[in-house]
Amino acid sequence: MKYISTRGGMAPATFSDILLAGLAPDGGLAMCESYPQLSRAELDAMRAMSYPELAFDLIRRFADDIPAADLKAIVDKTYTRATYGTDEITPLKRLEDGLYIQELSNGPTLAFKDMAMQLLGNLFEYTLAKQGETLNILGATSGDTGSAAEYAMRGKQGVRVFMLSPHEKMSPFQTAQMFSLQDPNIFNLAVRGVFDDCQDIVKAVSNDHAFKAKYKIGTVNSINWARVVAQVVYYFKGYFAATQSNDQQVSFSVPSGNFGNVCAGHIARMMGLPIRKLIVATNENDVLDEFFRTGRYKVRGSANTWQTSSPSMDISKASNFERFIFDLVGRDAEQVRALWQAVDSTGEFDLSASPLFAKISAEYGFASGKSTHADRLATIRHTFEQYGVIIDTHTADGLKVGLEQREAGVPLICLETALPAKFEATIREALDRDPPRPAGLENIEALPQRFEVMDADAEQIKGFIAAHV
Ligand SMILES: Cc1ncc(COP(=O)(O)O)c(C=O)c1O
Ligand SMILES: N[C@@H](CCOP(=O)(O)O)C(=O)O
């Protein structure tokens, strides 16, 4: 399998090349040249597989330059009961017939990011050791990618993490999870701005090719293809758990911000998984919902990006969205380049009058909706009263929008993207009680914190990296 860029300016590369390289040299995102297609017999065989078996069988199709035995060992070491608390790894929780929550947040940092990040940590360690290289990871987080990456890279040989987060915009638990880490290879930089400013800096630094090469900069955001591919696996697992045969279809509702999670669902669907709808659920920062309803993609600046009670989705420039648009325009890199030039110069593009717009739901199965603070509180309350289950604020956005799009006879799987313990204040507001906290994390907010506050300025961040490697 070879990888190309959504903007057409990258010579075909291997999985290991793009794993360490992050953003493509032309500013685009790496994509597989074509999606592996699963036969009916292969799908039938996958139904009986354990999570690690399934992960290996899917990921080997994308990472075919890693010897199969090595990849299998990496996958087996990653997806264990010790890390995810259950042999099922991503079990379905039944709310009622045909309505499920898929648990994706049983990993070390209580969010779905652990599903891919633990694999990424092990892949980095393996590849760097093989190449005798080191890597300085520059990441951006709105609250969950950061801690997942830092926990996955702690103590890994040859890896440093520089993680940018929006200053004072994450929940107290998320902040403490990251900033209490004292490991010498972890640097937390709190940026005066929003998540999009942090992500823009990651892209600006990655686009400085001389700096990137000199300081061996890599990425752990969903810019990194390996992150997205690892997330494809749980769509298969959820599908098999909710159905009896591969003749059935299911829909997934996906709390969305940077579009990485639902992009993994899109890839699963393109490989042949019988997914009916991919439901994109946003919070008040509803750029993606606007696009899927109207065809107009209009990004917003920091002044119009709201701080909400589902803070990890406070994103107005969905990086991964470019991967879907690449498919939508028939993999025409020139069109992608033109569309993103329009975003850079005018802040938007508009496909409402294009025949492509109708394809988004008819061919690709996308639907969308938005959820507000009041919706979130109502959904958390209803889910607790009706089913006795406490869900987090992001999962509540997904459930609210999923229910609006639910169809009779089609099982609906709502992806749980974090545990409620991370967003205690809103749970208290909704239920007048605290969510349960996993053992060992009772006093995390009281631990000493180590972080630097910096301006949203790529040059300052480059200076910090240069001084600390
Ligand atoms: C808890 C939570 N829910 C949802 C999202 C949105 O996922 P994505 O950015 O992949 O669309 C994120 C961040 O990515 C998150 O941390
Ligand atoms: N919501 C994320 C933002 C980054 O998304 P990613 O999937 O591209 O890493 C976060 O919590 O940090």
Image (cartoon, rainbow, N blue to C red):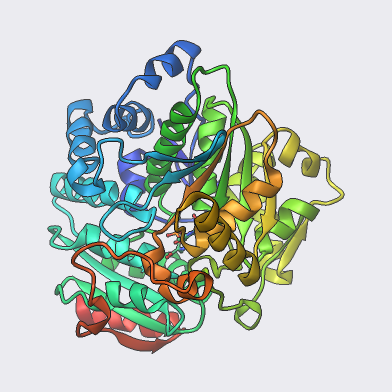
Q: Is residue 7 visible?
A: no
Res 137 quadrant in image: bottom left
Q: Is residue 221 left or right of residue 269?
A: left
Figure quadrant of the N terminus? top left
Relative image position of residue 339 (x, y in whole percent): 70, 56
Relative image position of residue 50 (x, y in whole percent): 29, 27
Q: Is residue 159 left or right of residue 221?
A: left
| Residue 427 higher or lower than 41, as above or below | below
Relative image position of residue 347 (x, y in whole percent): 71, 69
Q: Is residue 118 visible?
A: yes
User: What residue is at 41 percent from the left and 32 percent from the top?
Assistant: 237
Q: Is residue 278 left or right of residue 174?
A: right
User: What residue is at 26 percent from the left and 50 percent from the top?
Assistant: 118
Q: Residue lying furthest right in this view? A: 353
Relative image position of residue 437 (x, y in whole percent): 29, 65
Point out the quarter of the image occupied by ligand 2.
bottom left
